[in-house]
Amino acid sequence: MTTGTFTLTELKRILVDAAGADESVDLDGDILDTFFSDLGYDSLALLETAAVVSREYGVELVDDAVTAITTPRGFIELVNAA
C-alpha cells in the first residue's frame, strides 16, 4: 500500500496501466481540468482505475462517486479525500 498524497503523475500511470492510452492524446500536457472523455477515457476506464487506486492506496472509492467525476482534478481530489 502506498501512502501520501495522490498526484496527477500517479493518476496518469494508473490510467495508462489500467485502461491504456489514446495515442492522439498528450497526457503530459496540462490535463487537470480536461474532461476524461476528451482524454479518451470512459466510465469503465475510470472504474478500472479506481479499483487499482483502491488496492494501491488502501482507500475505498464508491462507484457512483467515481463515475460522476469528469476531470483528473476531480479524481485526485476524491482519492485524497478518501
Image (spheres, rainbow, N blue to C red):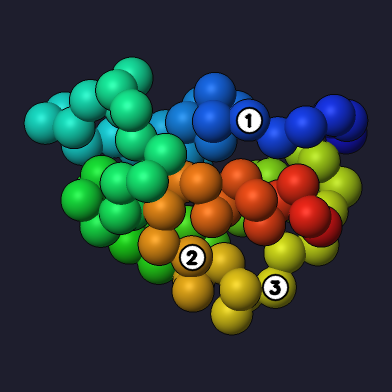
Q: For the point 71% across and 51% down, which residue is it?
A: 79
Q: Could you tell whether 24 is left or right of 18 in the image?
A: left
Q: Where is residue 82 in the image (x, y as percent from the top left)?
A: 81, 57
Rate crowding at label 1 as few (under 14), some (14 to 19) or many (20 or more) other CA atoms within 10 Å.
Answer: some
User: Which residue occupies 48% across, 65% down?
Assistant: 69
Q: Mark 2 points at which residue?
A: 69
- In the rendered image, which residue does mark 3 sit on? 62
Q: Label 2: few (<14), some or many (≥20) within 10 Å?
A: some
Q: Is mark 3 on a helix, strand or loop?
A: loop
Q: Distance between the residues labelled 2 and 1?
A: 16 Å
State the SS at label 1. loop
What amino acid is labelled 2 in the image? Ile
Q: Closer to the camera: disc 3 or disc 2? A: 2
CA gap between label 3 and label 1 equals 19 Å
Residue occupying the point 61% across, 73% down = 65
| Residue type indicated by callout 3 | Val
Which residue is tagged 1?
7
Amino acid at dot 1: Thr
